[in-house]
Image (tube, rainbow, N blue to C red):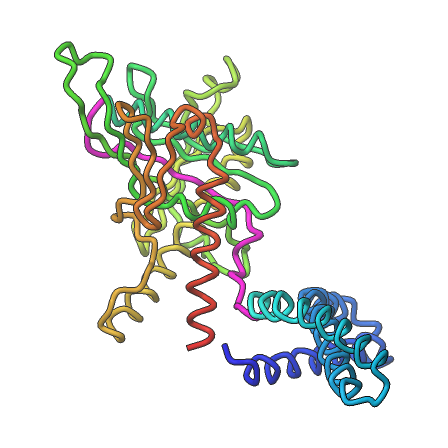
Amino acid sequence: MDTQRMLERLDLIQARYDELTELMSDPATVQDYEMIAGYAKERSDLQETVTAYAEYRSVLQGLEEANEMLHDEDPDIREMAQDEARGLAARQGPLEELLSKLLVPKDPRDEKNVIIEIRAGAGGDEAGLFAAELFRLYTRYAEGQSKWKTHMISENRTGIGGYKEVVFSIEGKGAYSRLKFESGVHRVQRVPSTESSGRIHTSTVTVAVLPEVDDVEIEVKQSDLEITTYGSSGPGGQHMQKNDTAVRMVHKPTGVVVTCESERSLTQNKLRALGVLRARLYEAERQRQITEIEEARRSQVGSGERSEKIRTYNYPQNRVTDHRIGMNSHNLPAIMEGDIDDFIEALTLDEQTRRLSDVGA
């Protein structure tokens, strides 16, 4: 993004920030708490950019004044101006870089909680076992974050300790921003414990990371739902076995099916199932819109579709490869313990770079 365009956008942001400040103190709106809360949220979102812009303007003004003093007859003043100009110039570049990043549109879903669905793909029992290991990876990662909580929603186990499917939620500030890059096909290459000849097998597991959706974002009509209840096979003891607390929810217009049996009460399971349903419908609509954009442009857009192979876990070579950015890690055991921050940081930087390029186009 060229400097002139950047300054024009920053002037607009500054004007909107000043307007919001006035609106929040306007006697005509001060009694409308919902409106004031909306203004305060928007103003808070602009605060970092406005603060950085004020510092940047101060640097530009200081440089202009220092350059004028370079023509002074007094050599001491000229020397002082040179020192001042060098210091200000050193601040100018980093501030321009920061402002460029702040002008990149943010993903409004980044602060959301997430629902993660892990499903065994090709590879039979071995795929199911790796699905269980990925479930452990993400729960361990969540345990390492401040105030994040994990809740089981539904599970379908294999007989040898794996999962055909496991669905769970992670609640915590910025959960989606950190975990959204995990959506896709994860491939594992290793010798299964049941393999007597030592031959390496390749298996796949599909991971879907869905942001939780508010009621206002996706409206689900009660008349569109077919709800049945049954006795849960999950934790909870005899009480869970004797009462129909588990829920199977079918969204009739789309055929989407959600089950939940992790909670102790029917009401809680219905609420969790409805949350999963909203997230799936929201994601389906988002993917539909992306497909339309792809067709209109007649070119591929990085959509994060689940069919894309995103990562390979090669056990014989102790290597994990993220195919989207060509990044390798040779510490596979640590990765499987939830140490995925290096991948997340690199993928976040890659996304920011692409967005910045789009804005500057």
- Residue 311 percent coordinates (x, y): 31, 40
Q: Quick one: 283 or 253, which is closer to the camera?
A: 283
Decide if residue 231 is on the left or right side of residue 65: left
- Residue 140 percent coordinates (x, y): 51, 28
Q: Quick one: 52 or 246, which is closer to the camera?
A: 52
Q: Quick one: 105 or 55, which is closer to the camera?
A: 55
Instruction: State the residue lying farthest toward the front.
Output: 75
Q: Residue at x 32, y 56 (%)?
A: 253
Q: Residue at x 38, y 25 (%)?
A: 133
- Residue 205 percent coordinates (x, y): 29, 35
Above or below: residue 157 compared with residue 97 = above
Disc tally is 0
Instruction: State the residue lying farthest toward the top.
Output: 196
Q: Residue at x 85, y 78 (%)?
A: 76
Decide if residue 336 is on the left or right side of residue 10: left
- Residue 28 percent coordinates (x, y): 83, 81
Decide if residue 242 is on the left or right side of residue 255: right
Above or below: residue 249 compared with residue 104 = above
What secondary structure predominates along the stretch shown in magenta? loop
Bounds of the magenta segment: 103-125
Q: Is residue 122 magenta?
A: yes
Please identify the quadrant where the C terminus is shown. bottom left
Q: Residue at x 33, y 52 (%)?
A: 252
Decide if residue 120 is on the left or right side of residue 265: left
Instruction: State the residue lying farthest toward the left.
Output: 197
Q: Is residue 118 magenta?
A: yes
